[in-house]
Amino acid sequence: MKVTKMAIILAGAALILFCVCLDAADNAAAKFPTGYRQWVHVKSALIGPEFQLFATEGGIHHIYANDKAMQGLRGSQFPDGSILVYDLLETAAKGGVTTEGPRRRVDVMLKDSKAYPGSGGWWFGRFMGNNHQDEALTEEHRAACFSCHQKRQTQGFVFSEFRE
Amino acid sequence: MKVTKMAIILAGAALILFCVCLDAADNAAAKFPTGYRQWVHVKSALIGPEFQLFATEGGIHHIYANDKAMQGLRGSQFPDGSILVYDLLETAAKGGVTTEGPRRRVDVMLKDSKAYPGSGGWWFGRFMGNNHQDEALTEEHRAACFSCHQKRQTQGFVFSEFRE
């Protein structure tokens, strides 16, 4: 009897864990900003070896915004559904020409006021390389993202400004 | 009588010249790729002092494509109405971070098979700085553009390839 009860509890726990993992995986995959390469290109910058955070940020990065995020960048509030992407690529330099290499990662800001009231309505996410499935940030990372983005509260917590 | 005739001829010539200039100005302004900053960002590169053509090409450039040009970049023929933009900006480097500065110029490729049969169907144009009115290339310049782009005949005369 005791063994059966234990088995049922363990099976139940395993099932819950499985569902939670499945759900997390689904959410992460669903949060990859599919199609962002067709969105508006906001601005770009190149990070070289002199920069303090070169190890993690080195390369060329492009910022992309979906239509809703463009409303925010044009001076309105960022509506729910706004998505901003920081697309970081390796670079290779030859004969004075710096060209784009493989993708390092895709960082995402996604606005959902009801789901993320503690971080100005924004979810912060990260997808390494060309992996669209596995979201890489811990909750501590996300808190660190928001801590820095908080400096831009009056700009809706967004650093980038649209280059006309 | 002779003076009157000369005056009429001169007035006529002036009128024709005025109309031709007006027409050219209209065409040039009409050919500026208005709204291209909302088009798809194809790729980017940075040109530094080591590069042979640094004087004219130095800075960061971004390539943009309208929807029709994207059909061409995705492997189909470039349909008439395809427009590609080469957006060249100055750069400023500080502490290892290279950021975007003022616009140097906007180069344009516009496909119109009937109008430009001699250059693979493409018109080549240039707008300096943020001047959207005055197109800057001579016919000799345009021939030089095409002479180089001819190397890419099998790619529809287009150098850029879409970075996924």
Image: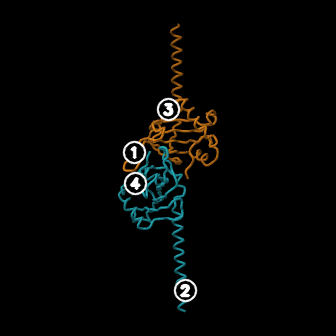
Chain colours: A cyan, B orange
Q: Nearer the viewer, residue A148 or B33?
A: A148
Q: Crowding near pointer 3: few (<14 within 10 Å), some, many (20+)?
A: some
Q: Does the CB distance between marks 2 and 3 fall below 8 Å?
A: no
Q: Distance between the Cα atoms at labels 2 and 1?
A: 66 Å
Q: Which residue is mark 2?
A: A7
Horizontal and vertical percent position of residue A18: 54, 75
Q: Do tags 4 and 3 sit on the same chain?
A: no
Task: Work out whether disc 3 and disc 1 sit on a shared chain.
Answer: yes
- Badge 2 amino acid: Ala
Quarter-of-image position of residue A132: bottom right
Residue drawn 49% across the image and 32% down it: B136
Q: How many marks?
A: 4
Numbered disc 1: what chain?
B
Q: Are the two marked residues, 4 and 1, in contact with CB atoms closer than 8 angstroms?
A: no
Residue on which disc 3 sits: B136
Which residue corresponds to mark 4?
A159
Q: Mark 4 or mark 2, which has the lower sequence index?
A: 2
The chain that hosts pointer 2 is A
- Position of A118 with respect to B120 (left or right) is left
* Up-down relation of residue B107 to residue A16 (above or below): above
Q: CA distance from mark 2 to mark 3?
A: 80 Å
Disc marking residue B92? 1
Q: CA distance from mark 3 to mark 1?
A: 26 Å
